[in-house]
């Protein structure tokens, strides 16, 4: 069988987390709204892609990815205090969105977008858990391949645009040469 590096793959699946022997349903991507990705581009967990990429349309799957190969073990060092100032909007703390249990999008100093969960809001700091919500869990996927074919040049170009740096990479559209007064919130997306 010939392996194609960049395949457009669509799967319907159910995901279960397994922690301390307990199996809990996490999410479903049904046939009506399947999960789609292009292999070879790092769009999904490598062990997930390795299990799926050579399957054919209609093939069923049931496999488990250990926590160490998924989102890693839970790390207490990833629970951090962030200054409340970074959650200010027009000089006011964003108390509507920054509440215990909320997932807040953040950006690292290197420009990487990440999510953190609010653990506690204190007087001067917000305690954030930067662990992935499924850190420490084995992941069990059961499902079926809905589509599997070589990716088109157009699909590869679209992914490159979405994953790249510069204007348009946030998916808000092409900023144009002006880059500052279009749909990207007043500036480049990077």
Image: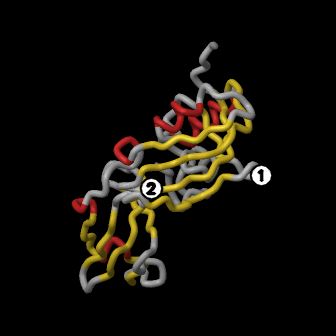
Q: Where is residue 63 in the image (x, y as percent from the top left)?
A: 53, 40
Residue visible at 40% across and 54% down in the picture? 137
Q: Position of residue 128 (x, y in %)?
A: 32, 69
Quarter-wise, where is residue 27 in the image? bottom right
Please state which of residues 132 and 55 is positioned toward the viewer in this rendering.
Answer: 55
Please state which of residues 5 and 189 is positioned toward the viewer in this rendering.
Answer: 5
Seen in the image, is 134 located left or right of residue 167? Answer: left
- Quadrant (top left/top right/bottom left/bottom right) for the N terminus: top right
Q: Are marks 1 and 2 in contact (CB under 8 Å)?
A: no
Q: Is mark 2 on a helix, strand or loop?
A: strand
Residue visible at 27% across and 65% down in the picture? 79
Q: Residues within 10 Å of mark 1 (few under 14, many from 20)?
A: few
Give me the disc on residue 18: 2
Residue visible at 62% across and 38% down in the picture? 61
Q: Where is residue 124 in the image (x, y as percent from the top left)?
A: 24, 81
Q: Residues within 10 Å of mark 2 (few under 14, many from 20)?
A: many
Please state which of residues 132 and 163 is positioned toward the viewer in this rendering.
Answer: 132
Instruction: Name the front one of labels 1 and 2.
Output: 2
The extreme top residue here reads 2
Seen in the image, is 140 located left or right of residue 73? Answer: right
* Mark 1 lies on residue: 32
The extreme right residue here reads 32
Relative to 3, does residue 24 appear above or below in the rendering? below
Q: What element carries label 1?
A: loop
Label 1 vs 2, first from the N-terminus: 2
Seen in the image, is 184 located left or right of residue 102? Answer: right
Give me the disc on residue 65: none
* Distance from the alpha carbon under mark 1 to that under mark 2: 26 Å
Quarter-wise, where is residue 94 in the image? bottom left
Relative to 126, does residue 134 appear above or below in the rendering? above
Quarter-wise, where is residue 134 in the image? bottom left
């Amino acid at each position: 069988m010939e392996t194609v590096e960049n395949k457009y793959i669509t799967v319907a699946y159910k995901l279960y987390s397994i922690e301390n022997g307990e199996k809990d349903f996490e999410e479903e991507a049904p046939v009506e709204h399947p999960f789609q990705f292009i292999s070879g581009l790092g769009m999904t967990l490598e062990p997930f892609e390795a299990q799926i990429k050579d399957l054919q349309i209609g093939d069923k799957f049931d496999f488990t990815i250990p926590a160490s190969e998924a989102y890693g073990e839970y790390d207490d060092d990833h629970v951090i205090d962030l200054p409340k100032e970074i959650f200010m909007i027009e000089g006011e703390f964003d108390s509507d969105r920054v509440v215990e249990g909320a997932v807040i999008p953040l950006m690292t100093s290197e420009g990487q977008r990440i999510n953190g969960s609010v653990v506690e809001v204190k007087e001067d700091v917000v305690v954030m858990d930067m662990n992935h919500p499924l850190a420490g869990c084995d992941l069990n996927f059961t499902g079926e391949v809905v589509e599997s074919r070589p990716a088109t040049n157009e699909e590869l170009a679209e992914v490159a645009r979405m994953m790249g740096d510069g204007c348009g990479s946030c998916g808000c559209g092409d900023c144009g040469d002006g880059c500052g007064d279009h749909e990207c919130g007043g500036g480049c997306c990077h």
